[in-house]
Amino acid sequence: MSEMKKIKNLKEFSTSADRFEGANLLCPGCAHSIIVREVLNATNDDLILSASTGCLEVCTAVYPYTSWDASWIHIGFENGSTAVAGAETMYKALKKKGRLKQPERNPKFVSFAGDGASYDIGFQWISGCMERGHNIMHIVLDNEVYANTGGQRSSSTPIGSSATTSPEGRRSYGEKRNKKDMISIMASHHIPYAAQVAPNKWKDLVKKIQHGFSVDGPVFINAVSPCTTEWKFDPKDTMHLADLATDSLVFPLYEIIDGHELNITYRPKDLVPVEEYLAAQGRFKHLFKDEYKYLIKEWQERVDANWAYLNRREEARV
Amino acid sequence: MANKGWDEFEIGAMLRTFNGKIDDIVGTHQENRAYSENSSFVASVADWRINKPVFNKDFCIDCQFCWVYCPDVSIISRDKKMIGVDMDHCKGCGVCVEVCPTNPKSLLMFPEKADEETELAAWPAKNEEKK
Amino acid sequence: MAFDKMELQKIEVWDGNRAAAQALRQSQVDVVAAYPITPSTPIVEGYAKFLADGYIEGEYVMVESEHAAMSGCVGAAAAGGRVATATSSQGFALMVEVLYQASGMRLPIVLNVANRALAAPLNVNGDHSDMYLGRDSGWIQLDAFCPQDVYDLNFIAFKVSEDHDVRLPCMVHQDGFMTSHTAQGVHTLTDDEAYGFIGEYKPMNDMLDFEHPVTHGVQTEEDWHFEHKARQHNDLMVKVIPKIQAAFDDFEKLSGRKYNMVESYDMSDADICVVCMGTSVETAREVATEMRAKGIKAGVVGIRVIRPIPFFEIAEALKGVKAIAALDRSSPNGAAGMLFNEIAGCLFNTDTKALLSGYVYGLGGRDLTKAHLVSLFTELQKNVDAGKVTTPLQQFIGVRGPKLSFL
């Protein structure tokens, strides 16, 4: 086992030498790269990375440029998890056979994918990787929409959001279905670690990533990634949106250990009404019409119920 | 990189980040790495900017919020000190200004063509109404 | 060594699947990521048993689909080691997306394909639909006619595919059931001979070299895509055939068994010939010999290397012949057969003005009988005698109902 990188505070964290480069093609204010930086800087170990097709992938490896300073692979939309699992399997094989070029290294295998590539098209591949117990970490950059292709709904798109394939209109308030509970599904694979993180809570994120790197077996991380383009807010407000997401409990921060032990890792001191979170984004603008205001109330009730559920699970220690 | 012909690049559209070997990447900051012509580090997105951040070190407390929340690896921090903004990689999103906690802020956005010296000379005073 | 070698008889009685599994074992593959599908399943089952019995040191992952199998193979190959898998039919079809990615990323992977029909309607038996589906995928495709070929061609596949001048994945095709499940005598190599022939895997652009990070699987648009595809096609067209030839030559020195891009049988003075693939080659050879006894100068051309197509070798093999039958074991679904078109292309600008006719046969495992071939050769002779093709250019043989012919 390699030594865990010591990160006491932000000043210490800021001494990290980034392994992700600028002049990538992500939108100004994109949270993806903030999350990626926090993840990569959480460890000093070598990294083998993958990305499934999506914003992160198409914006960081457009020939003849790469924004990655560690080995990185992209195959397709659905199979980024399996790509890195394949590399991890080769690592095990070569280790056993004594053919690693730098046998003293302790690489970490990380797969990045969007919510579409994880909740929808890559679901089976991720489930397979979790079930087989690969030593990999799959990180969802969850912006609740197919942002790379212009804003189509995914099964992570929440109720009332206007996406291009579930648009609001004269007779519709947009997306009709609730977001898939991916973390529970992944935790049900009885993997050693599953967690939800947010870029604004960098310390919580780093701690979870470090824990994820320390366990033996697959890890699933869902990271809320406010999308300036599809959530429709000013690029400068990315971190404000992340704050609203965590402090309204729309994205509660918690972890599930060994598939059952749930810990809430962040309890907002000043709870933000869900309405404020919704009001900050163009994708929910129509909900503020009189006829749809009931949906805002339902949103709050749903978030409250989920928070109560998480608290019950934490208390029960099961 | 120039638009090479079909026989002039490595097979498989594979890209190498560095020229030669890199020994201790986490112990080597950007300025000391031998990036290849294929690393986006050598490219610039400066022309994306409409507004640019100007850094006023007089008010900076080196909290590093701007460093951690910069999406574009454009806040240059060395030895726990904020040094400045990498203007080749900054896209002008303004996140650094929003997360800056000082009063007045140590980073402010100005139009791309604004003169930095002039803006620094006219930096706003402490806002007493803010907490 | 943390694994045991296996003592093989000089001749083992193996079906094609067993031969493939043994070849994979002897090649000391580092990672096999696989998903079972009839009729290729016994390859990965056999491999699993070798692992369970301690004859394999590499890693073996049973994934949740063929798409994931090839995805895992791509990740493993990019990481830097010897990689192989097996599939058939629907599994092959599910893999197709990743087949293109594997070849475009220039990763050496050996894929054993026990050829099988494609649904609908669902069918588990052998035809060449899956093989044909792969022919534009940028892979090298070798075709085995019998279990011996399966065994030998696997070694050829690793050697060519992993060559740093090639770095292209390679399929070894065998007929589902007819080869995959039919046991025959297979001359073996010892474990040391087999491994010595392929040699140690030599990594290239390997992700696991932490001192030289690489980016695999980039995006290229209109400014770069064409050049990369052109490069891949160039390497397939120019580099692969000589490497296969060199591997065939080396293999002949080692084993005494000689392989050719195009396997000609009794072609030196043939007036008529059949061009086909898979087990049909052996049947056709038997019938050709019988035709010769009747005074008809018949020959057979078996296509050993499907991609890259041995264009000039095919033209050379067919240059003296007067009438040719192209036998396609896949429904062309609205066109002339693949072999018909390939042969026409190979011969069109040559002096050979042979009469070419196409036959579609054996779909979904339907037998190609000797009687079919006798009447086929007889038709070809009629064409020669008449100086023109006397039948429609495309005929279906062995199908019930009114005679089907087109063109």
Image: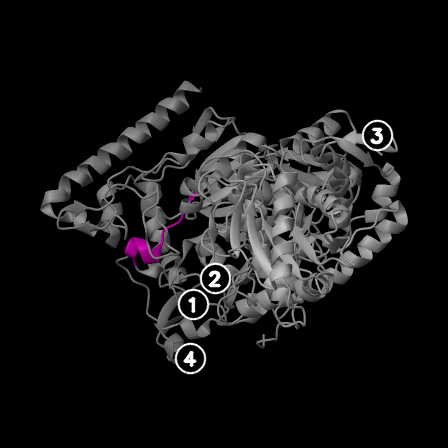
Q: Are marks 3 and 1 in contact (CB under 8 Å)?
A: no
Residue C406 vs residue B4, the one in the foreground = C406
In the image, what residue occupies the spot 15% across and 48% down?
A: A288
Give the structural element (helix, strand or loop) at label 3.
Answer: loop
Tell me, yes or no, whether dots 1 and 2 are on the same chain: yes
A56 left or right of C182 in image: left
Q: Quadrant of the C terminus of chain A?
A: top left
Q: What amino acid type should be assigned to the residue bearing mark 1?
A: Lys
- Report whether residue A181 is seen: yes
Q: Is residue C29 in view?
A: no
State the CA–CA distance, disc 1 to disc 2.
Answer: 7 Å
Camera-near label (2 vs 3) is 3
User: Marks 3 and 4: CB-CB under 8 Å?
Assistant: no
Task: Specify which label sits upstream in the sequence, 1 or 4.
Answer: 1
Q: Which residue is mark 4?
A: B117
User: Dot 2 corresponds to which residue?
Assistant: B72
Disc 3 marks which residue? C4
The earlier-in-sequence mark between 1 and 2 is: 2
Instruction: Give neighbour class at mark 2: few <14, some 14-19, many 20+ (Cα, 10 Å).
Output: many
Mark 3 vs mark 1: in front: 3
Q: Is residue B115 left or right of residue A17?
A: left
For marks 1 and 4, give the one nearer the viewer: 1
